[in-house]
C-alpha cells in the first residue's frame, strides 16, 4: 500500500488548522491636526476598512502591496539558466474609502499583526494620522 505524500499530509493539516480561524477586526483611530479622534475598524478577513469622520461613515477596501521577482541561476553541467520566481507581500497597504454622499478618503498604512500606523487624506488635503495599537 502506498504511503500518502508529505505534501498531502502537510496540506491536510494546514486546512484543519486554518478552518474556523477568523481574524478579528482591528480597531483604529484617526487623529486630525487638532487631535480630534475619529474611530474606525480594519477587517483583515475581507480586506475592508471603515471609519466615521465627523458623523459621516466611510467604507472601502485596502490592498496589501505584493510583487514578484525573477532571478536566473546557472545550473547543471552545461550551465543552462534556470528561472526562479519569488512572490512576496509586504506590510504596506493602501485604502480607498467613500461615503454615501460621495466624499472620499485615501489611506496608506503599515501594519504588523494588530498594530498599524499611517495616514489618511481627503481630496481637499485634510490629513489624519492613523493608529491602531493592537488592543
Image (cartoon, helix red, strand yellow):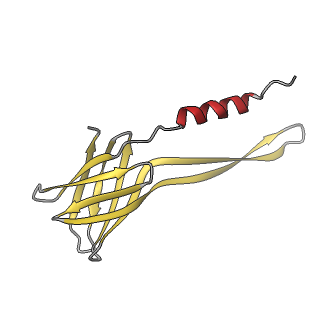
For residue 106, above or below residue 114: below
Q: Residue at x 85, y 42 (%)?
A: 79
Q: Position of residue 33 (x, y in %)?
A: 14, 59
Q: Position of residue 134 (x, y in %)?
A: 29, 39
Q: Is residue 128 left or right of residue 9?
A: left
Q: Position of residue 75 (x, y in %)?
A: 81, 39
Locate the C terminus and report the quarter of the image it occupies: top left
Between 24 and 135, the one nearer to me in the picture? 24
Q: Residue furthest left?
A: 34
Q: Is residue 9 left or right of residue 111?
A: right
Q: Residue furthest right?
A: 78
Q: Residue furthest bottom?
A: 102
Q: Residue at x 29, y 77 (%)?
A: 102
Between 11 and 76, the one nearer to me in the picture? 11
Q: Is residue 23 left or right of residue 75?
A: left
Between 72 and 38, the one nearer to me in the picture? 38
Between 63 and 23, the one nearer to me in the picture? 23
For residue 128, above or below residue 104: above
Q: Is residue 69 left or right of residue 1?
A: left
Res 30 quadrant in image: bottom left
Locate the N terminus and report the quarter of the image it occupies: top right
Q: Position of residue 128 (x, y in %)?
A: 22, 59
Q: Residue at x 90, y 42 (%)?
A: 78
Q: Residue at x 38, y 51 (%)?
A: 43
For residue 10, above or below residue 58: above
Amino acid at each position: 500500500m502506498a504511503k500518502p505524500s508529505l505534501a498531502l499530509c502537510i496540506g491536510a493539516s494546514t486546512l484543519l488548522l486554518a478552518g474556523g480561524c477568523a481574524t478579528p477586526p482591528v480597531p483604529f483611530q484617526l487623529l486630525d491636526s487638532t487631535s480630534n479622534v475619529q474611530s474606525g475598524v480594519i477587517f483583515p478577513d475581507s480586506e475592508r476598512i471603515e471609519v466615521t469622520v465627523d458623523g459621516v461613515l466611510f467604507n472601502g477596501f485596502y490592498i496589501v502591496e505584493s510583487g514578484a521577482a525573477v532571478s536566473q541561476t546557472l545550473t547543471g553541467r552545461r550551465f543552462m539558466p534556470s528561472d526562479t520566481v519569488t512572490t512576496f507581500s509586504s506590510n504596506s497597504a493602501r485604502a480607498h474609502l467613500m461615503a454615501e454622499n460621495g466624499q472620499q478618503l485615501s489611506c496608506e498604512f503599515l501594519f504588523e499583526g494588530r498594530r498599524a500606523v499611517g495616514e489618511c487624506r481627503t481630496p481637499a488635503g485634510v490629513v489624519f494620522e492613523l493608529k491602531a495599537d493592537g488592543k
